[in-house]
Amino acid sequence: MGLRERKKHQTRQALIDAGTRLFLDQGYEATTVDQIAAAVEISPRTFFRYFGSKEDLALDFTVDYAERVTGALAARPPDEPPFTALAHAFRAYVHSMEADTAESAERFVRHRRVIEANPGLLCTSIARMIEIEKRLTAEIARRQGTDPGTDPRPRLLVAFVTSAVRVGMECSVDGEAYLDDLVTSVENALCLAEAALRPGWDQFSLGSSGQVATNASSPG
């Protein structure tokens, strides 16, 4: 990045850090945009150059999440089974957090704490995750050569894998080993998901009646 881009990035991160600390210290609802801007010594007007609202700031991690997961899925080999590709994409996402700086890991933990303390933010976070899942579904459908509007397999596959990931992420955000625990927990959840399904289930074809049509070459 050039100097201007670096400064903008630094201001954005400073706003995120100031905002999440204020949310944790005095509560999300009690915190105003004016307070966040003042903590970084900028005007509220400048704040809105970076975020549309304090909610956008609180849920900024979903932007990074979307970029990492969709990018990891797009990078998987084109002939890889869809379920395997998606599972490895999420593994790449959680392991990429291990490579982040300690500051980035702490930022992620603070985001989690803020969201878990605010039911409204949690609902909005889930809504954003659903939109990301639609993007993943479209990519899986493209890999399968199917229409997700008529074929339920891409959506079912994404829902199954993301549910496993959510279960894996339900570890406590308290404790020094949080990130290690999260990676291990997500890995275990994905392994259980893989073990729960017969190989090749995501490549079964659908008959004209909408029922699963198996054949001799399908896994038994």
Image (cartoon, grey):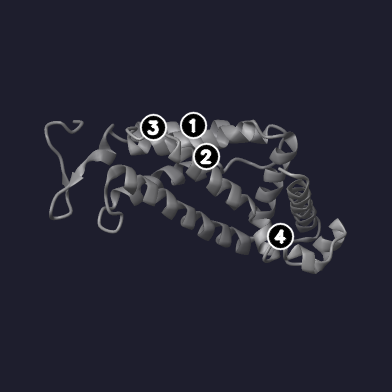
Q: For mark 4, give the secondary structure.
A: loop
For marks 1 and 4, the one nearer the N-term is 4
Neighbour tally class for label 4: few under 14, some 14-19, many 20 plus, Cα within 10 Å: some
Q: For mark 1, give the secondary structure.
A: helix
Q: Is residue 32 visible?
A: no
Q: CA distance from mark 3 to mark 2?
A: 25 Å
Residue 12 position (above or below residue 76): below
Determine whether label 3 and label 1 are within 8 Å by CB: no
- The residue wearing badge 3 is 77
What's the residue at 34%, 32% (across, down)?
80
What's the residue at 29%, 48% (across, down)?
153
Looking at this rendering, what residue extends furthest in the front direction?
Answer: 2
**What's under tag 1, amino acid-wise?**
Asn
Q: CA distance from mark 4 to mark 3?
A: 36 Å
Q: Give percent across and percent down for residue 125.
A: 57, 57
For marks 2 and 1, the one nearer the N-term is 2
Determine whether label 4 and label 3 are within 8 Å by CB: no
- Which image quadrant for residue 42? bottom right
- The residue wearing badge 2 is 168
**What's under tag 3, amino acid-wise?**
Pro
Q: Nearer the viewer, mark 3 or mark 2?
A: 3
Q: Is residue 23 visible?
A: yes
For marks 4 and 2, the one nearer the N-term is 4
Q: For mark 3, give the secondary structure.
A: loop
Determine whether label 3 and label 2 are within 8 Å by CB: no
- The residue wearing badge 4 is 50
